[in-house]
Image: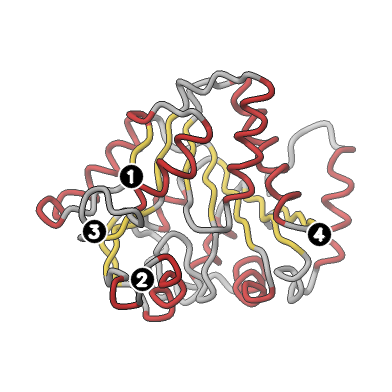
Amino acid sequence: MAEVAIVADADEAGELVAESIVSLLRSKPDLVLGLATGSTPLSSYRALAHRIRHERIDVRGVRGFALDEYVGLPAGHPQSYRSVISREVVEPLGLTPDLVRVPNGDLRTLRMAGSEYEAAISAAGGVDLQILGIGRSGHIGFNEPGSSLASLTRVKTLTESTRSDNARFFDSLDEVPMHCITQGIGTILRARHLVLLAFGEAKARAIAAAVEGPVSASQPGSAIQLHPHTTVVVDEAAASLLAHADYYRYAWASRAALPIEQAG
């Protein structure tokens, strides 16, 4: 079972995630982070940037791997995830740009892009902490319903609902790419610690399916149940359909009494 933290809002969630990352950094300056994009992790990145600045934490050795990238967007496009990661993560946190990688969505080299990304993650020693969001359809990364639970980094076709959700970042729905390259569910599950974030009532059904539903390719987020160390951080609205919410609150509140770290 994942540990579930039900918090007041995204800002409180951000503080929790930042504390976890800072704790890891103190023992591992070359920490490997798995980086999600979208609006959900922004409070975590803001809180982490604040900690780094005010505590003067050296992050020059931190390495990062983005979850996904659109296929076919021109280099430098403001909504490419390379641009988003640079703008929202690398620059605010002061990371070394060359140590942060994004899947290669260039059509000319797409055939080898997945295997090359897998090799790069392995060469870095694997991801220490993977930040995740979840879509209304239950997708993590861009692993849409039906994705293999053993899948690796590869090209996927985006559903119309995912494209509609992401259209707010473009001038029109027509501009949202139809394809992406994404870390697979199997790739994600190799990270040492998964941190899944969700806020708002629109994510409640996906969170309930991920945390308490059957493990199924039809609900890609449910794969987190297969991981030995997953932390789910949600606000009250996103937690509203969890059958065991009272237990999660009780367990989270009492975790400090244990002399060892909980892992599932």
Is the image coloured rainbow, by chain, by secondary structure, or in one colour? secondary structure
**How far apart are the alpha carbons under marks 3 and 4?**
42 Å
The mark nearer the N terminus, 3 or 2, is: 3
Please state which of residues 100 and 251 is positioned toward the viewer in this rendering.
100
The mark nearer the N terminus, 1 or 2, is: 1
Q: Residue at x 67, y 30 (%)?
A: 51
Q: Which residue is mark 2?
A: 171
Question: Badge 2, how many Cα within 10 Å: few under 14, some, many 20+?
Answer: few
Left or right of 224, for residue 189: left
**How far apart are the alpha carbons under marks 2 and 4?**
41 Å
Q: Which residue is mark 1?
A: 102
Amino acid carrying mark 4 in the image: Tyr
The mark nearer the N terminus, 1 or 3, is: 3
Q: Which residue is mark 3?
A: 73
Q: Residue at x 53, y 54 (%)?
A: 132
Q: Is residue 159 above or below residue 84?
A: below
**How far apart are the alpha carbons under marks 1 and 3?**
13 Å
* Residue farthest to the bottom, as pictured: 160
Amino acid carrying mark 1 in the image: Val
Looking at the rendered image, the disc whose residue lies closer to the viewer, 3 or 4, is 3
Q: Secondary structure at mark 2?
A: loop
